[in-house]
Image: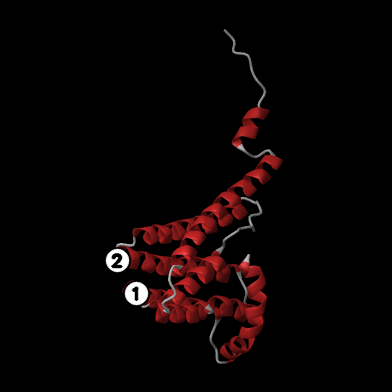
Amino acid sequence: MLNRYARAFFTRVLTPTARFLLRIGVGPDTVTLLGTLGVVACAVAFFPRGSFLVGTLAVTAFIFSDLLDGTMARLSGRASKWGGFLDATLDRFGDAAIFGSLAYYFAVNDKLGLFLACMICLISGSVTSYARAKAESLGFKCDIGYVERGERLVGSLVATGLDGLGVPFVQAIALWALAAGSTCTVVQRMLYVRKQALALGLTGDAAAAAEPETEETP
């Protein structure tokens, strides 16, 4: 949900930077790759050590490349299915680095509840993305979600940054809220696709019900 409202705003903000990078010969795929490497490197370098404030600022700076590369592709007329595939694939590495690094910190510091919350966010986030990709590859719509990638990243990074500033309880509340919301989003998308499948008579139950009964001959 957040993507729909925030993307237009940040596109306008980042357009001058996108034009400059294109002018000096930097391509959108290069920005995608460097942005992912930056997110992974900063998350792994700072979060496992408990450097939450510095880590959040560093990771956030590189996450903006996720918006910058798309803007560059549109401005240059190089938007392509390959670019979309590359961006979506590398996003999974960035997400895994963020939540995996936080999970590691909580595990070694005996905060097993927050470790579990991070793992739920990581797993349900991956399933949420896969569910949409698989549904759309089968011809279904699946563009809904209570908690999508934007909400997971903003919520986890803001809460982690505030924890780095010494604000108590925010990180725990945010991570468990995101874990619950991400899990609900998986269920929401499954039900949404099943509703479409039922309307088209494409579920196994519907197909079985439609088959005529045949008498068994002795």
Residue 53 percent location from the top left of the image: 42, 79
Where residue 102 sits, quadrant-wise, is bottom left
- Residue occupying the far front of the picture: 168
Q: Nearer the viewer, residue 58 or 214?
A: 58
Q: Quadrant of the C terminus?
A: top right
Residue 201 percent coordinates (x, y): 68, 38
Q: Quarter of the image holding residue 5?
A: bottom right
Whether 200 is drawn above or below 63: the answer is above
Which is more toward the observer, 171 or 186? 171
Q: Residues within 10 Å of mark 2 (few under 14, many from 20)?
A: few
In space, the residues marked 1 and 2 are separated at their CA atoms by 10 Å
Quarter of the picture holding the N terminus: bottom right
Verify CB contact (< 8 Å) between mark 1 and mark 2. yes
Q: Mark 2 or mark 1, which is nearer the start of the sequence?
A: 1
Can residue 35 be spotted in the picture? yes
Q: Which mark is residue 109?
A: 2
| Helix, strand or loop for disc 2 | loop
Q: Nearer the viewer, residue 37 or 153?
A: 153
Query: Which residue shows up at 48% across the image and 56% down it?
Result: 124
